[in-house]
Amino acid sequence: MEIGLVELSRMQFALTAMYHFLFVPLTLGLSILVAIMETVYVMTNRPIWRQMTKFWGTLFGINFVLGVATGITMEFQFGMNWSYYSHYVGDIFGAPLAIEGLMAFFLEATFVGLFFFGWDKLSKVQHMMVAWLVAIGSNFSALWILIANGWMQNPVGAEFNPDTMRMEMTSFFEVLFNEVAQAKFVHTVSAGYVTASVFVLGVSALYLIQNKHKDLARRSIAVASAFGLAAALSVVVLGDESGYSASHTQKMKLAAIEAMWETHEAPAPFTAIGFPDQDARETHYAVEIPWAMGLIGTRSLTQEIPGINDLVAESEEKIRDGLIAYDALMIIREQREATPQIVRETFEAHSDNLGYALLLKQYVDDPRNATEAQIKMAADDTVPGVAPLFWAFRLMVVLGFSFIAVMAYFFYRASFRNMQFPRWSLYAAVAIIPTPWIAAELGWFVAEFGRQPWTVDGVLPTALSASHLSIADLLITLAGFLIFYSVLFVIEVSLMVKYIRKGPFQDVDETNAWLERHEARLRSETPAPTLTATPAE
């Protein structure tokens, strides 16, 4: 298979996936924040909270619609650009996506209409329930997608059937409760909550700088900073859990992120900064924090974390073991029902490493004919690009801790300084609006680029997963997606800027009604003056 074809297919999917993920975090976080604001409105009956719900809900709606438009494109690509992947693992990968469409997306899409058009048709409590159902649907949707993606990172609950030449599900329970999927879900949605909190914080800060919509801005900052602080702290904690999970499910990815070439004595140090050199297999000018990596990756002081060189040697042994499974598989294919039982038993004994033998396909048509040099090259291919992973991860971590500091500062000012914010802090809040998206995209880059050369880790190499399309087909569709998505990006930004400039919708009737009720309550609570007679002189 032409390497150009695979690389172009990867480039196209990366473009659409990372563009789609510009919308996902804001949708996840804003849905919860809007539901919180409407809950406060129902509890307090104050019009300002209804106004906040409508304003931030409008921005949520713009983001939601464009997110759906870009997400649908991705699913079609599995059939168009990755047809062999879809055939090979469709029985497992397709199930969570189907459930996401039937359960989560339909729930979300149904109630989002009621949210926007049901203000005058539903009671306050009913409309609040709709807001929460939209939020639950949004997060439920992320759950099923991340279960599918988590299976690609850690393929549990499935096995290869030599008669159908496909992966088949053996335990839906294991797929559902895959530790990688669960860790990715909570980490991803928490990152989405931080993204929305920074967005709300930044837009509210802009209003305070412009000296307008101050009541809405101050209350929005109070909600966003409290919610964002909790979310930012959880991102760090849950990210640590993802690292622990990777230490026994994706050891090569973890070693590449840390540029750990050799296996250290336990507990391993964490390389805070350095310059990885993949050709020389060393990291120049490394600054290490003793014990930190051992504690993060293993939760112990005695367990080793294997280095890249040892993992490459281990991959070479897996390739050799996988060749035994591949040879037995070819016999099964040729003889079908007449296959001797010992051949099937041989395949079963070595089938876990069949995917490693398939790595040789990009060097030789029949892996059984691979030379020693080709086996070593295939083993070396299991190392992803170390330097990009190393730096992407560290930049993501720095941004993550900065969000904690920002949210803690604004929470302190909102809670203990009477919502008085220095002007420099407001400008800073506006300036950092793009940074959560940068962190989120870096996170996805680490997760997906770090899995290479696998589409399904240890099972199906990326080089075998792509459809047999022409280079011209891919170039034309890639250019088309680039143009179409650029237009959508301009529309998204234009609409967001338009409605932010327009500001919140003033519900005059609701405000007047609330003022009348408030004045009536004050009159009822104020005792009537007592008239005393003055004695006649």
Image (cartoon, rainbow, N blue to C red):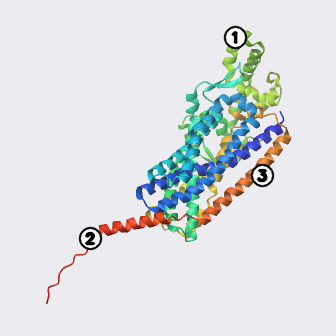
Left or right of 468? Residue 212 is left
Q: Tell me the crowding category of disc 2: few under 14, some 14 to 19, or many 20 or more residues within 10 angstroms, Cα based.
A: few
The N terminus - image quarter:
top right
Mark 1, residue position: 342
Left or right of 25? Residue 131 is left
Residue 167 in view of the camera: yes
Q: How far apart are marks 1 and 3 (CA)?
A: 56 Å
Left or right of 450? Residue 232 is left
Residue 128 vertical position relative to residue 413 in the rendered view, above or below? above
Element marked by disc 2: loop
- What amino acid type is highlighted by mark number 2? Pro
* Count of number-bearing discs: 3
Which disc, if any, is residue 483?
3
| Residue found farthest to the bottom | 537
| Spot occupied by residue 364 in the image (x, y as percentages of width and height) | 83, 27
Q: How far apart are marks 2 and 3 (CA)?
A: 70 Å
> Of the residues tagged 1 and 3, which is closer to the observer?
3
Mark 2, residue position: 527
Front residue of 342/295: it is 342
Element marked by disc 3: helix
| Spot occupied by residue 211 in the image (x, y as percentages of width and height) | 55, 71
The C terminus - image quarter:
bottom left
Residue 485 vertical position relative to residue 253 in the rendered view, above or below? below
- What amino acid type is highlighted by mark number 1? Ile
| Spot occupied by residue 267 in the image (x, y as percentages of width and height) | 57, 39
